[in-house]
Amino acid sequence: MLLLSTILFNVSDIKLNKFNNRNTISVNESESDLETEAVKQEPIQIAINHFAEKIYTNGIVDILVIYQNNTLCDMELYIRSELLDVAGNVVTTEESMLEIRRNDSGVKRLEILTPEGIKTGRYKTKVTVWDGDPKENTTEILMQSTSDSEIIYFANTDEFDLLDNSFWGLSDKKLGETTFTPNNVMIQNGVLNIKLSKDALSGGEIYSVDKQGYGVYEISMKLPNVPSSITGFFMYYPPDFYSEIDMEIFNDSSGKLLLTTYADGKVSNEREIQIGFDPTQDFHDYRFEYSENQIIFYVDDQLVDTFDSGILKSGMQLMINCWYPKWLDQKPAKEEKILLIERVSY
């Protein structure tokens, strides 16, 4: 998804036009007004494309500057690109120059390298364009644009080249009638496999060794087709019913998703969602964003629900499991089936 901000300086009325297949506003001023807004009363058109995207560990944020110089003069523009947190604080800044020949047009790609130490969360981008070095008193701002939508940045992404034992533990226990067996968890070709055994109520579970707090958590996975079993992507810390955030997807073609939270010894939120596809046919992204006063759930970047009350305040372990809950038929797989996990980001 991209977001576009454009300003055009010229002499006529304000009108709506098309630029790069996006709606833009042309701001047209009288010659006397142009002295504070434009470059020496000469028309120049600048558009900023902000991209709403997910950025993974040490990734690059892209922004596009689209320009058109209708003057008879060569120009040198000064550009400052900024990454902002949700409070509007500047996280990092990149600066560059853009030389434009007379009657020239084109596109310049800006890159913001995410700095080390930046936390997982939502960010915005801001671009300011001057008609020269802003340290000079005579320069003017031609364009200043802040993205409407936000970038989601993940500081940590596990793509399962191996199982990081410093972060993940393997469950060896029984949950209801399901036995979690460490041997049912393995990595093959960079994909985490959690197996449902043939003819047995046997599954697998991994958990973060340390507690995790507020943040954004996402998994990319393809479910096994085993009716009466589910896959859970969730946060939990004992005792039961006090600290839990659940995304539970039925391992069948129904597209049924259960969203649940527990706090203070009881269910604090519960919702059943239809996600509109068969999760056993392909990989899909499932995400929840956990903050002090809200939990927001997404599937393939589409908002599916929001909980604004009953939000637990304690840290929990991040967990993934594949198993047979008591409230389903508990019919074991007739042949070995595998939950495939490409990526977990947090």
Image (cartoon, rainbow, N blue to C red):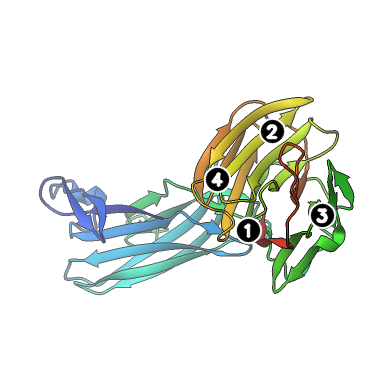
Residue identifier under label 1: 221
Between the residue at mark 1 and the residue at mark 3, the CA separation in whole angstroms equals 23 Å
**Three-letter amino acid code at the position of disc 3:** Ala
Residue identifier under label 2: 261
**Three-letter amino acid code at the position of disc 4:** Tyr
- Mark 2 crowdedness (10 Å alpha carbons): few <14, some 14-19, many ≥20: many
**Which tag, 1 or 3, sits closer to the chain's start?**
3
**Which tag, 4 or 1, sits closer to the chain's start?**
1
Disc 3 element: loop
Disc 4 element: strand
**Which tag, 3 or 4, sits closer to the chain's start?**
3
Between the residue at mark 4 and the residue at mark 2, the CA separation in whole angstroms equals 15 Å
Q: Nearer the viewer, residue 277 or 56?
A: 277
Left or right of 126 in this view: 247: right
Between the residue at mark 4 and the residue at mark 1, the CA separation in whole angstroms equals 14 Å
Q: Position of residue 305 (x, y in %)?
A: 54, 36
The circle drawn on residue 298 is 4
| Quarter occupied by residue 193 | bottom right
**Three-letter amino acid code at the position of disc 2:** Thr
Which residue extends farthest left?
12
Instruction: Look at discs 3 and 2 and give the one toward the viewer.
Output: 3
